[in-house]
Image (tube, rainbow, N blue to C red):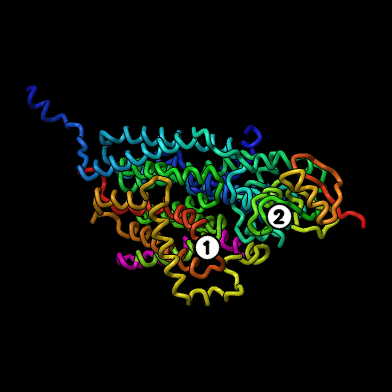
Amino acid sequence: LILLAPSLLLPILTGLAIANFRPCRHGWLRGVLGTAVGIGLASLCYFLSLATGIQELVIEGLLLIGAGGWWVWRRKDPCLHCTAKDRPAGGYERLLMTAFLLVLAGAAAVLVAESAHTPHGNWDAWAIYNLRARFLYRAGPNWRDAFSPLLLWSHPDYPLLVPAFVARTWKHIGQDSTWVPALTALMFTLGAPVVLAAVVSILRGREQGWLAGLFLLGTPFFIMHGAAQYADVEVAFFVLATVSLLALHDDRPAEREFAVLAGLCAGLAAWSKNEGLLFIAVVVAARVAALLLTRQGSQLKHELPMFAAGLAPILAAVLYFRQTLATTNYFLAASVGGGPVTRALDFSRYVIVAKGFLVHLWTFGDLYVSPFLLLGVFVLLVKPDAGARRSSAFTSLFAVILMLAGYSMVYVGTQGDLAWILNTSLDRLLLQIWPLSILSAFLAVRRAEA
Amino acid sequence: MGKKERKARTPDPVRFAYSSHWKAGAVLVVAMVAFAGVALIYQESSPTRAEDTASLNEVRFSELRQALPPRITMGYVSDIGGADFSNNAAYFLAQYALAPVLLDPGINHDLIVGNFSSPAAIESALHEKNLAVVRDFGNGVLLLRKAAN
């Protein structure tokens, strides 16, 4: 851990500078977002370093100088949310805050205990992400062996956010310690409820913020997948962060950095896993639809270029990876049974997928009762708020719906035993949109006050 | 200024009234979190938790890994996990443990990794595939080569 600290300093400082960290009441939000963005960018720097032969510390250093310049330029601006007049605290607030912090500490303890018990993570962790990290670190100049045709079973088409960051950090500390992927997973698993609580707290009141964070922490499936070191948790984090930042931009349109950061986070979702590419298309479509529906279409001409500015460099790196190294995705490849288009014309596949979604929406979450159902009950109890900022709520809701539609179409076009694929993967895809679903609900319901 | 007047000028602290709808929602969330907490504690403290196969495998293959050059493609034979190597946990775990060495299922390479469940399985594979032992690392892990005719 002592060796880790200096290695983590550079990405964290870069991320904090990009997230324009200020020591204010919202420091937690910017701190967690900044750390996540820093990890993502450090991962990209390492990949570029491998591809170009330039030392990763040089690339990271240049990035830090740029980010530092941005921070110096903007540091005198006050946090607009802190200058807004806030309503007084209610009686339950401290109780909920204490509960949130206790449950967060409990989740951290579970993550550490699980990481000690299964230090290499579960199946996908050692068969995909940590395996790739080992190749990138151990193979030295032969790192391209990580994408050998002999490893097709390990999905060499998956992007490298986790493997490249882990390999980079191993290189810095000089050993392939299992604590590096475990701590990376811990950061994203605990970071998601913090971001959720902070954003809902800013936009819908502090009590609602703590409740939203508790809702996510009350899903053992999310915590255990963090401990399993599956990259779906990173996707879930960046999906949540993207839509949260767009909601913050709705609230404070003058803070354009929110839109840039949203684009950056959408790009990092795509650098985490292939579903992130689907999310980029989905979030743009959801945003356009939400702003047009709420007659705020004029906002798009300012927001979309900002979003694109954050997204473009990450997306370029992802596309470069896909063009030069990634193999074709096995499940979407053409096969004896025809290509994805042929499969898409088979109506029976839609029935299997629909049944799969119904079953897994019910069984998702390891709670005996579907947390999606509990979220629906929560919305019915607290009731939708006609006065809520509709563009944020619609963006979030449309993103959830479009992601579900996108997943369905990918399943329909997938080759292989569809029922088996649904059974072994759908819960993890639902996990990717679970924090976003909670955000959607809390952006739509009434505040705590009578 | 009388007492009454002073009291009237001092503003009351703003009292925050929670809606009954919100209280009902909060009870639901707290109950869910409490249940999840109990479920997690039960799961974590269960005496029937399976041992971590990846960690066990790391120990089994550690000596072989140290004996291998960093870049080599080797054959792989095993009686564990069946003949389908596209979804075979034992093969995946061996590849994970030995990375960056590449394992190619079959015996089409000079050196071959053997991963067996029992001495009988080793004997059977050596005989059937005409292989010779270069070194036995114990626990069913062997370095093999094709036997001379």
What amino acid type is highlighted by mark number 2?
Answer: Leu
Where is residue A284 shown, x and y percent of the image? 44, 65
Residue A410 left/right relative to A287: right
Where is residue A420 shown, x and y percent of the image? 52, 60
Which numbered circle lies on residue B48?
none
Relative to A410, does residue A71 appear above or below in the rendering?
Answer: above
Say which of B25 and B8 sits in front. B25
Marks 1 & 2 on one chain:
yes
Q: Which residue is mark 1?
A: A277
Quadrant for the C terminus of chain A in the image: top left
* Residue extent of the magenta highlight: A292-319
Q: What residue is at 33 percent from the left and 52 percent from the top?
A: A373
The mark tally for this picture is: 2
Say which of A236 and B38 sits in front. B38
What amino acid type is highlighted by mark number 1?
Answer: Leu
Where is residue A199 shown, x and y percent of the image? 38, 47
The mark closer to the camera, 1 or 2, is 1
Residue at mark 2: chain: A
Magenta-colored stretch includes residue A11: no
Q: Which residue is mark 2?
A: A50
Mark 2 falls on what kind of element? helix
Q: What residue is at 22 percent from the left and 40 percent from the top?
A: B18
Say which of B1 and B125 sits in front. B125
Residue A150 can be seen in this image? yes
Residue A78 can be seen in this image? no
